[in-house]
Image (cartoon, helix red, strand yellow):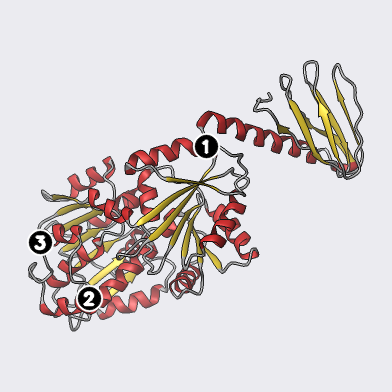
């Protein structure tokens, strides 16, 4: 028998708000959690992103808050500003059902004076990040003596980001006679310890298996490529896929910034989202993305945590996530609300182990694709064979770097060449004049914009000396690995 929000005992006013948003049937996490939370019980809820957990804790909060009292009665702690903003937006929609209800978002980077004025006027629900909440507590602008409901959202990410001390400081300022809700996508040991220390016989609610429904609406593709060809491959895939809105995940802030610049130079409407941006810039970027003034958002994991934007058709994992949970969180940005989505992960040969770990974690073999710009030869990418291919590329980079270092003052000593066993190296294009000498087989090669070829013999040991503008590459042929 299908459960409805009405059968859960929600007020008529809240039901009208939900119906106006087209929300009629609760998701599995809402169906399991809301009755327990309405009863005032503590609960540890494990659910993946995109399963509707925000409403699972907001609806019980809205039912219990007394609008005739101006003090803070419920506190929601989140790891990031973006998640705080997202939850606040949902809370304000529901607050329309409660006359006199006030909601405050408290996070860093926002005008603190405006937050202070709102706190002075009274607010019943406070949603914020640990740092800004502690700032208000130390100022005395926020007191938690009347808080009866405490929510820790994305608890695993909060502790992963190093907020354990701040979170514990805030919890100790909330009365012990409270209801505590902890929501987390994963349940590592530090989250379990937090629950054991600060919760009162919590119900264990898990809907992790139901997150597979979210994944089933997403076509998951792996595009095999080399690191050096990844940017060109991404651009080619974007042009072929033509996403309406897409989130592109990078491992670091620097890589996100560099990639965003390359995408803009390629003519795309893109911007970046990471921790180095000011709050006003972050809000500006997110507003432009929600309004579809941007088509591509290049982000890091932490900055993109909690992003919930309608219309995201594609997620690109430019850098493959090292953990299964991060993979699920990332691709969960698309395929929402019954829509279909596409998740494309770029895997270099060295990413084989991480890719296999993801496939084991989601119990699914991902679709493989090979792009003509991938930098890989035909045939499946294997762990050992691909490592050798990457070694050849790295050796080529090393040779070129050595040559560049030898170009100071118009003349210098280049990097040491490859030493292989009977292998054959083909040099790239060169300019200027250069001489090459190999032990046991003296040969002179000059080039003026053409290509030079060098066959190693003897012990294959060679050193090169190149003039200004000289350039030498090495490409390992025949699958042998030079040392």
- Number of residue marks: 3
For mark 3, what is the residue? Answer: 35
Left or right: 149 in relation to 271: left
Q: Quadrant of residue 112?
A: bottom left
Q: Quadrant of the N terminus?
A: bottom left
| Residue 370: percent from left, percent from top | 54, 46
The disc, 2 or 3, on the residue closer to the chain's N-terminal end is 3
SS of the residue under disc 2:
helix
Foreground label between 3 and 1: 1
Q: Residue at x 83, y 29 (%)?
A: 454
Which residue is more in the foreground, 226 or 44?
A: 226
Cα distance in 3D space between marks 3 and 1: 51 Å
The disc, 1 or 2, on the residue closer to the chain's N-terminal end is 2
Label 3 crowd bin: few (<14), some (14–19), many (20+), radius 10 Å: some
Q: Which mark is residue 380?
A: 1
Q: Which mark is residue 94?
A: 2
| Residue 10: percent from left, percent from top | 11, 72
């Amino acid at each position: 028998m299908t459960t409805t929000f009405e059968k859960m005992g929600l007020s008529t006013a809240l039901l009208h708000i939900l119906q106006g948003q087209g929300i009629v049937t609760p998701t599995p996490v809402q169906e399991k959690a809301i009755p327990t939370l309405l009863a005032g019980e503590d609960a540890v809820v494990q659910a993946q992103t995109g399963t509707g957990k925000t409403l699972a804790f907001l609806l019980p909060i809205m039912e219990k808050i007394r609008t005739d009292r101006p003090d803070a009665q419920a506190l929601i702690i989140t790891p990031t500003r973006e998640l705080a903003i997202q939850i606040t937006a949902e809370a304000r929609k529901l607050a329309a059902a409660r006359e006199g209800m006030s909601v405050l978002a408290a996070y860093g980077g926002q005008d603190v004076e405006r937050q202070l004025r709102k706190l002075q006027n009274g607010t019943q629900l406070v949603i914020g990040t640990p740092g800004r909440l502690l700032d208000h507590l130390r100022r005395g602008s926020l007191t938690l003596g009347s808080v009866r409901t405490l929510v820790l959202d994305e608890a695993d990410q909060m502790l992963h980001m190093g907020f354990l001390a701040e979170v514990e400081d805030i919890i100790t300022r909330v009365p012990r006679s409270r209801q505590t809700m902890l929501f987390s996508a994963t349940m590592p040991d530090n989250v379990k310890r937090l629950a054991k220390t600060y919760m009162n016989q919590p119900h264990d609610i898990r809907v992790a298996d139901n997150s597979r429904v979210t994944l089933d609406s997403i076509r998951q593709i792996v595009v095999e490529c080399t690191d050096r060809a990844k940017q060109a491959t991404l651009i080619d895939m974007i042009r072929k896929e033509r996403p309406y809105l897409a989130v592109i995940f990078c491992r670091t802030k620097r890589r996100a910034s560099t990639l965003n610049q390359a995408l803009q130079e390629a003519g795309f409407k893109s911007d970046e989202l990471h921790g180095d941006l000011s709050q006003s810039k972050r809000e500006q970027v997110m507003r432009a993305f929600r309004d579809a003034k941007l088509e591509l958002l290049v982000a890091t994991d932490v900055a993109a945590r909690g992003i919930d934007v309608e219309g995201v058709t594609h997620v690109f994992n430019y850098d493959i996530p090292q953990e299964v949970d991060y993979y699920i969180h990332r691709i969960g940005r698309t395929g929402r609300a019954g829509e279909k989505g596409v998740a494309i992960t770029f895997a270099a040969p060295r990413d084989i182990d991480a890719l296999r770990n993801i496939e084991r974690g989601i119990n699914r073999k991902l679709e493989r694709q090979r792009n003509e710009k991938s930098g890989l030869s035909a045939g499946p990418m294997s762990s050992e064979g691909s490592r050798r291919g990457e070694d050849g590329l790295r050796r080529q980079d090393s040779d070129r770097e050595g040559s560049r270092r030898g170009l100071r003052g118009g003349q210098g000593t280049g990097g040491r060449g490859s030493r292989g066993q009977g292998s054959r190296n083909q040099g790239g294009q060169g300019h200027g004049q250069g001489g090459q000498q190999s032990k046991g087989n003296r040969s002179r090669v000059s080039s003026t914009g053409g290509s030079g070829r060098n066959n190693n013999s003897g012990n294959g040991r060679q050193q090169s000396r190149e003039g200004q503008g000289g350039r030498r590459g090495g490409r390992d042929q025949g699958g042998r690995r030079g040392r």
